[in-house]
């Protein structure tokens, strides 16, 4: 199929962008990397009257350290994140997750901000942001605001983004020596949407867990945090017995949604496989450090 006819404009400033959004409202769509929008246009799932190309807004690009946070601009591509020395040093989970995103051609064009704004519960960046207690930066004609990732993603493809707001970037805390991160997902083929995925952001004193954030993708309508199991692990020595206790807790806590080919029971099983795998890796890592 081909897209329906639409007008195209490429603003040079944020002020021009907001004027266009105010004028055209729901009839306008923003184009960043285009990896989602172009598909929906060609399948006529979206038929805007105007496509606004925001790739000329250089203030939405770049990665930089801001105090104790790493800020990533909305137009930063997946490949730029994957290859960034700053990301490898300060946000290693993102470097782990990036190779799981589709294929190289898509990573070269797709953007950090586009993934965040779309709010796909099977996407890697929203899941990582929720695990890492990231913040989304939003801008409107009236100013700038930040919102936690766990509050930003509200329902299936539904976010806290107001009609006059734009995602301009997001930040995550800088990793410390006490932190431990992991990311993994299970898909039928590399590059496919994951059936289930897990991001772990933890901090330790020796082998004792001070924080273990468990964020799952592909399980529910939004990136899902296993709050009860997280609380269970705080203050515990992360040995193999504790890992099994956490897995048992997750089995009771998880309430996955089915997809076209996988039942809730299958997704629950795969999610607990990932949890056992990554928490066991955390145990091995902390044991090696303690030795």
Image (spheres, helix red, strand yellow):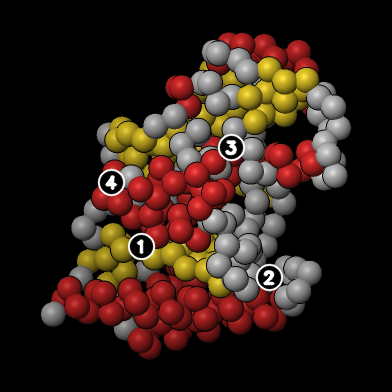
Identify the residue at image location x=48%, y=76%. Answer: 275
Cα distance between the residues tagged 3 and 2: 30 Å
In x, y percent, where is residue 32?
59, 33
Helix or strand or loop: what does disc 4 sit on?
A: helix
Badge 2 density bin: few <14, some 14–19, many ≥20, Cα 10 Å: some
In x, y percent, where is residue 265?
69, 81
Badge 1 density bin: few <14, some 14–19, many ≥20, Cα 10 Å: many
- Which residue is the site of mark 2? 256
In the displayed structure, 181 sits above or below 265; it is above
Identify the residue at image location x=39%, y=32%. Answer: 62
- Which residue is the site of mark 1? 181
Rendered-image quadrant of the C terminus: bottom left
Mark 2 vs mark 1, foreground winner is 1
- Which residue is the site of mark 4? 85
Q: Earlier in the sequence, mark 4 or mark 3?
A: 3
Cα distance between the residues tagged 4 and 3: 22 Å
Mark 4 vs mark 2, foreground winner is 4
Cα distance between the residues tagged 2 and 1: 24 Å
Q: Earlier in the sequence, mark 4 or mark 2?
A: 4
- Which residue is the site of mark 3? 33
């Amino acid at each position: 199929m081909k897209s329906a006819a639409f007008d195209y404009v490429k603003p040079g400033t944020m002020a021009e962008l907001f004027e266009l959004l105010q004028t055209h409202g729901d009839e306008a769509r923003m184009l960043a990397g285009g990896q989602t929008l172009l598909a929906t246009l060609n399948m006529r799932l979206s038929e805007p009257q105007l496509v606004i190309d925001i790739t000329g807004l250089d203030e939405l690009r770049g990665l930089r350290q801001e105090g104790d946070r790493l800020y990533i601009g909305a137009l930063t591509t997946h490949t730029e994140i994957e290859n960034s020395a700053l990301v490898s040093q300060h946000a290693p989970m993102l470097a782990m997750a990036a190779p799981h995103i589709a294929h190289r051609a898509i990573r070269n064009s797709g953007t950090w901000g586009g993934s965040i704004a779309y709010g796909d519960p099977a996407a890697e960046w929203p899941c990582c942001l929720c695990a890492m207690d990231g913040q989304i930066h939003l801008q409107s004609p009236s100013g700038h605001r930040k919102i936690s990732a766990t509050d930003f993603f509200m329902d299936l493809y539904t976010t806290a983004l107001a009609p006059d707001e734009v995602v301009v970037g997001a930040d995550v805390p800088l990793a410390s020596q006490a932190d431990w991160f992991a990311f993994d997902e299970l898909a039928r083929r590399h590059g496919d949407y994951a059936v289930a995925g897990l991001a772990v952001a933890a901090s330790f004193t020796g082998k004792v867990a001070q924080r273990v954030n468990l964020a799952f993708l592909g399980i529910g309508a939004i990136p899902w945090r296993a709050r009860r199991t997280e609380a269970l692990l705080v203050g515990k020595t992360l040995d193999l017995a504790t890992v099994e206790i956490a897995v048992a807790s997750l089995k009771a806590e998880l309430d996955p949604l089915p997809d076209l080919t996988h039942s809730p029971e299958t997704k629950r099983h795969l999610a607990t496989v990932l949890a056992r795998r990554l928490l066991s890796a955390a145990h091995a890592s902390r044991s090696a450090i303690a030795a």
